[in-house]
Image (tube, grey):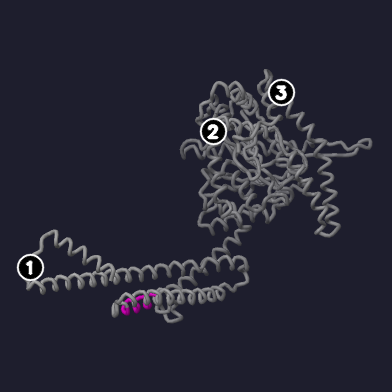
Amino acid sequence: ELDKSRCSDAMMFFRRVIGSKENITAVRELALYLEEWKEPKVLPLLEKQRDLLDRLDGSDASDGPVKEELGKIAADLAELDFSMDSFWAELELLEKREGRGGSGTPTPASSADLGFTQAKSCWQSLLAGGQPFQLLHSRPLQMAGGFLRGVLEAIGAPHTDPRGIYVVSVIGAQSSAKSTLLNFLFGCGFAVRAGRCTRGLYASYLKPARGGQPMLVLDSEGLLSLGSEGGVFDGQIALMCMTCSHLVLVNHKGELSRQLQDLLEVCLFAVRHLRLARIQPRLAFVLRDQHDRSRAVHEDMLKQMRSHLEDAARTLGSPLHDLIMLDSTAVFLLPSAVTSELRQGQEVCWTSELFAREVLHLRSEVFRWLREDSCRRQGEGPSEFSSLATWFDYAAAVWETLEQFGEQLLHYRTIHEIELRRELADVAKSAVRDALDGSSEVGGAASGFHARARQMVDSFVARMHANPSKLDLETTDLELSRALACLRDEFVTQLEESFQERASDPRFSATAKEQAKQQIRTPIEWAFENHLYTWKLHLKKASDERAMHELWVHFTGVLNRHLAKSGHRSCLSEAESHELFESEWRSYEAS
């Protein structure tokens, strides 16, 4: 499909831009023009979408025409949901199509036509200057490929720092001003606007002018929103940041919430089972738009959350400090970033001096944490992320793992649900064990499926040896198979009844019980197949013995008849003996 696709007109224009003499300036101007072109097209659609949603709230929920029009608007918005990063992603696909990705060797013609080398040089200059770039893009999310990796490797090559790079990320709910926080803290250029302005995962590379340690800043898509793909998506984004960062800023509007705590607990569960984290990230909470910035109240709330997280980690069989670092005082209260008032009938907005001062204090704390944690890890070996390319390879491996196993681990909503599922699994295992091996309350081991099946197989084996004729062997095999299948069905019914009785606790949801009930039949099926296989081995042995006995009887009779006919004085030549054997063997097979 990639080979058959044609290069779009917009992409042809982008290639001409990056191939121009002043390509860096031209790309920056193109980004500004692109946003100016999109704004008058997007804003009316958003306004119409809001009006339709209001109409839908005030009318019948099954209003077909309104929903159909909302679907068309959503499709139109999706068509306009692109940026300069979309061009770079398409350029990577073009490079892949031309065979230049990975270890492919470019031809002179492709180099002249598409100018990938010049494009990489242009993008390298932009990213080295701090321009944000997209790491996770599209729907479903996918990691950027080798084109971006090559650019990052070229950025880090001439500036290799033995101390490695710091990685700082932010997670939080949608529209909680995460991008604004990073822009104020580190001077990044992440997009800022109302609604969902960050899709997937963006990054910005910062190199201090005075020889400080370089830093990679990650800006993630908003969590816990109505427009997201659900709990699995939120968990994947949060885990990606937690496992690929030295410091994670949890940006939150208002007070610490139970919903946020549940998400972190499920992330701890996934980190513990996937064994993803190369380091233990430090978590710090940034509470936004706080008018009453009394630290005592919020620190008490953080201590309570830390206590719950420690309990969750203990439940998982690991101390909290082996998974994450969380100080009981790592909470910062920020006032509103923007202050506004009416002047001569117009609203005027500006950043308050108080917010700037508090952000500066948070910035100093961030760098203090990074330095202290870096010094603490120096004795443990080389730097975790020695270069941008090293970090990219690790992040790509993490995302591949999250794509493969995230659905299995992140569909839980709370650690309490995980504990209940485990408890229900223990109930199911106990019921299955009693069904297979027998319960001490009901006849002991003799009442289990294994004992009953062995007894049945042994009785049929004895019957088979008592009368091993061909007809009886086939009949006995059919009867045993039917009897064993009936015994299996009997125990499956008993097992399901026993499980329902043991899982009658109202804490277990009907959905969880139904899922467990569908799985408990499998061990009985395996045991049934095992005993049936044992019977087939006995049947094969008896059949072979019967065949050997019949063969011996037949040819012994032939020899005895021949000797009796010749008075025990006849001698056969080798040719005559071969002829006699072939004749008698045909006769034996036909019988």
Seen in the picture, residue 154 relative to 305 is either above or below; the reply is: above
Give the mark, 2 or 3, whose residue is nearer the N terminus: 3
- The residue wearing badge 1 is 570
Task: Report how far apart the C-alphas of labels 1 and 3 lie in the structure.
Answer: 111 Å
Q: Which residue is drawn at 68% across and 23% down?
A: 16
| Residue nearer the viewer, 262 or 147 | 147
- Let me know if residue 213 appears in the view: no
Magenta stretch: give its range: 453-463
Quadrant containing the N terminus in the rendered view: top right
- The residue wearing badge 3 is 26
Q: Which amino acid does the dot numbered 1 rest on?
A: Ser
Query: How many numbered markers are drawn?
Result: 3
Where residue 41 appears, x then y in whole percent?
81, 37
Give the mark, 1 or 3, whose residue is nearer the N terminus: 3
- Point out the frontmost of discs 1 and 2: 1
Where residue 312 appears, x then y in whole percent?
57, 57
Mark 1: which secondary structure?
A: loop
Q: Is residue 390 left or right of residue 88?
A: left
Task: Report how far apart the C-alphas of labels 2 and 3 lie in the structure.
Answer: 27 Å
Q: Mainly helix, strand or loop, the magenta region?
A: helix
| Residue 461 falls inside the magenta stretch | yes
Give the mark, 1 or 2, whose residue is nearer the N terminus: 2
- Point out the frontmost of discs 2 and 3: 3
Mark 2: which secondary structure?
A: helix
